[in-house]
Amino acid sequence: MSERKYPVITISREFGAGGHSIARVVSERLGIPYYDRDFAKQAAARSGYSQEDIDREGENLSRSARLLDNILNNSAGYFSSHDAIYQAQKELILQFAAEQDCIIIGRCSNLILRNAGIPSLDIFLHADVNLRTEHIQKLGLNGKEDPRKYLTKMDNLRETYFKTYTKHELGTYHDYDLCLDTGTLGYDNCIEIITSLAKQQGLNLKHQ
């Protein structure tokens, strides 16, 4: 691994809070890769599940699926698809963080790195539910579903996934170095704050 110029940055977020868009621009500003949707192909190769399975289950877990997994996990030889996909993504997160400076979006990456003893700059992005609803509707992420209901569903899936694999509540402030309201601050200000903080921490790394 080459000398660190910046800390590994993890960006956790509420659905529709602009995490992907903000990470992409921060990535361009710092000149480092960001990993989000590219998880699917590589995690599929590791887990043996299809890319479509990863897209569907890679960060989402319903309460009913969690309950079923808990029951079946008591059976000998049972290993759920959710567990296999999580393990594949965990291995990728650790690999990416070990190889180079990068930005990792979601997938419990902040706590995975913390538990592995890998320093990171952990960000949580959130916004008012009305603004998030407008955002996903503008992008057409809800398809034919009611945008507010779709947002609530996705929030629940992410929260259940995060709690299942970390035993923490998603968005709890002490799990992050910085929590930013993308609706109040705006994307540009959030990008500037994250970029500036990463550069400052990068300077600190050089003097350690």
Image (cartoon, helix red, strand yellow):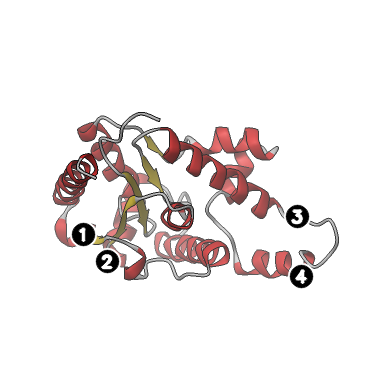
Q: CA distance from mark 2 to mark 4?
A: 36 Å
Packing grade of label 1 (10 A; few <14, some 14-19, many >=20) is some
> Which one is closest to the eye, mark 3 or mark 1?
3
Q: Are marks 1 and 2 in contact (CB under 8 Å)?
A: yes
Residue at the disc numbered 3: 79
Residue type beneath disc 3: Phe
Mark 2 falls on what kind of element? Answer: loop
Residue 51 at what x, y percent from top left?
61, 36
Point out the image quarter for the N terminus.
top left
Q: Earlier in the sequence, mark 3 or mark 1?
A: 3
Number of numbered discs overlaid on the protein picture: 4
Residue 131 at what x, y percent from top left?
26, 60
Mark 3 falls on what kind of element? Answer: loop
Q: What's the mark number on residue 183?
A: 1
Answer with left or right where residue 73 lies relative to residue 126: right
Residue 117 at what x, y percent from top left?
44, 53
Residue type beneath disc 4: Ile
Point out the image quarter for the C terminus.
top left
Mark 1 falls on what kind of element? Answer: helix
Q: CA distance from mark 3 to mark 1?
A: 40 Å
Residue 181 at what x, y percent from top left?
22, 62
Residue at the disc numbered 4: 71
Q: Earlier in the sequence, mark 2 or mark 3?
A: 3
Residue at the disc numbered 2: 128
Residue type beneath disc 2: Asp
Q: What's the mark number on residue 56?
A: none
Question: Looking at the image, which residue sits at the far front?
Answer: 208
